[in-house]
């Protein structure tokens, strides 16, 4: 699964990222333009900025029951779980942190982590990063 995740993520990430037209004072979840990063597993929707090039905010949707394998990012990020029940796997995947709606976490750049959407509905996360998004799988 991890190789499929990496290949799909790299294949889909290429190309322009457009932010849905929205009022600067409000961006409704119902108006988000989702883009599949890993088909059937993970989708992104831009809030502001271009996640391929710069600091940005985005929504991440992880499908119910889906697992995102252990990986790292070059830049740190801040996140808030909007809906669903998410488990973060940290470092060696032996440390598990269960999160519910409204929970915040910080992920340092280079720290190994993974995710499991443990709910029957998609896990929706808001993420802010000071730099471009990248992903390196941890083998």
Image: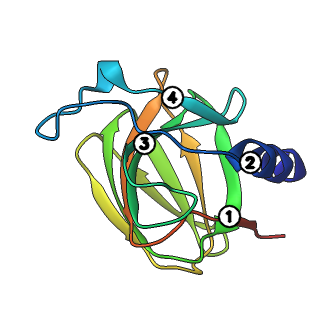
Q: Earlier in the sequence, mark 1 or mark 4?
A: 4
Nearer the observer, 126 or 28: 28
User: Which quadrant of the figure contains the N terminus?
Assistant: top right
Q: Which residue is mark 1?
A: 135
3D distance between C-alphas at marks 3 and 4: 8 Å
Residue 105, quarter of the rendered image: bottom left
Q: CA distance from mark 1 to mark 4?
A: 19 Å
Residue 19, picture quadrant? top left
Q: Residue 134 in the image: x percent, y percent?
A: 63, 65
Task: Give the alpha-carbon distance from disc 2 to disc 1, as whole Å.
Answer: 8 Å
Secondary structure beneath label 1: loop
Residue holding disc 4: 34
The tag earlier along the polypeptide, 3 or 4, is: 4
Numbered tag placed on residue 46 in the rendering: 3
Residue 117 location (% of width, % of height): 53, 38
- Residue 9 marker: 2
Residue 72, quarter of picture: bottom right
């Amino acid at each position: 699964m991890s190789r499929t995740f990496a290949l799909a993520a790299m294949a889909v990430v290429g190309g322009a990222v457009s932010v849905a037209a929205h009022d600067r004072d409000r961006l409704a979840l119902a108006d988000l333009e989702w883009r599949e990063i890993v088909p059937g597993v993970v989708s992104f929707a831009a809030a502001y900025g271009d996640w391929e090039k710069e600091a940005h905010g985005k929504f991440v949707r992880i499908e119910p029951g889906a697992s995102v394998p252990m990986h790292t990012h070059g830049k740190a990020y801040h996140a808030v779980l909007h809906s669903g029940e998410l488990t973060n796997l940290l470092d060696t995947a032996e440390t598990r942190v269960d999160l519910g709606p409204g929970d915040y976490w910080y992920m340092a750049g280079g720290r190994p982590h993974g995710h499991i959407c443990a709910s029957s509905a998609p896990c929706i996360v808001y993420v802010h990063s000071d730099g471009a998004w990248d992903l390196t799988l941890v083998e």
